[in-house]
Amino acid sequence: MFLVIPSGVNSGVLVVLLLLVGVAMFLCKGTYFSVQPELGIPTNVSATAVAIATLIGYLPDMFVHTMFGNWIDTYGNAGYPRIIIYGTATGVLGCIAALIAVRQSKKIAKKAA
């Protein structure tokens, strides 16, 4: 969306759009660790599972901003499509992980039944 907005658009529109993206992102955060019971993770190791998931999930935050900045410095405006491709690829990986989790959840539910 931000790539196709014409130049000279009111900055208020950009702020509202950015806030909407942020709100959508943080609404999803509530579901990060809610799948533990469905995946058969016992309550007594729940905190350890959250710690491991957090480490893996937030690890890209340690390097992604530097990587994006490097892309923009190196490629100029051509760096932005690379950022979009990176985001799309990580989204696809997230969808694959979600599908695997759903399949695992169905197996656990079937065993419990």
Image (cartoon, rainbow, N blue to C red):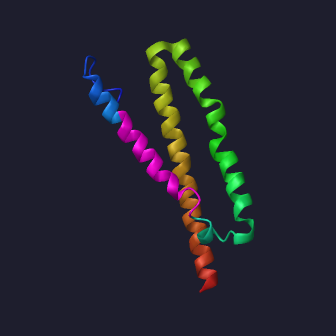
Magenta span includes 52? no
- Magenta-highlighted residues: 18-34
Give how far across and how far down residue 105 sits, in percent.
Answer: 58, 70
Please tell me in which quadrant of the rendered image residue 70 appears. top right
34 sits left or right of 3 in the view: right
Residue 100's place in the image compared with 69, above or below, is: below
Residue 70 in sight in this render? yes
Quarter of the image for the N terminus: give it: top left
Quarter of the image for the C terminus: give it: bottom right
Give how far across and how far down residue 41 sits, in percent.
Answer: 68, 68
Please tell me in which quadrant of the rendered image residue 60 appears. top right
Residue 40's place in the image compared with 111, above or below, is: above
Give how far across and how far down residue 81 sits, in percent.
Answer: 45, 26
Residue 17's place in the image compared with 26, above or below, is: above
Which residue is most to the bottom?
113
Q: Residue at x 72, y 52 (%)?
A: 52
Closer to us: 87 or 24:
24
Residue 1 in sight in this render? no
Please tell me in which quadrant of the rendered image residue 66 appears. top right
Q: Residue at x 35, y 41 (%)?
A: 20
6 sits left or right of 89 in the view: left
Magenta span includes 24? yes
Q: Residue at x 49, y 20 (%)?
A: 79
Closer to us: 14 or 86:
14
Closer to us: 26 or 90:
26
Q: Magenta region's main secondary structure?
A: helix
Give how far across and how far down residue 36 sits, in percent.
Answer: 62, 66
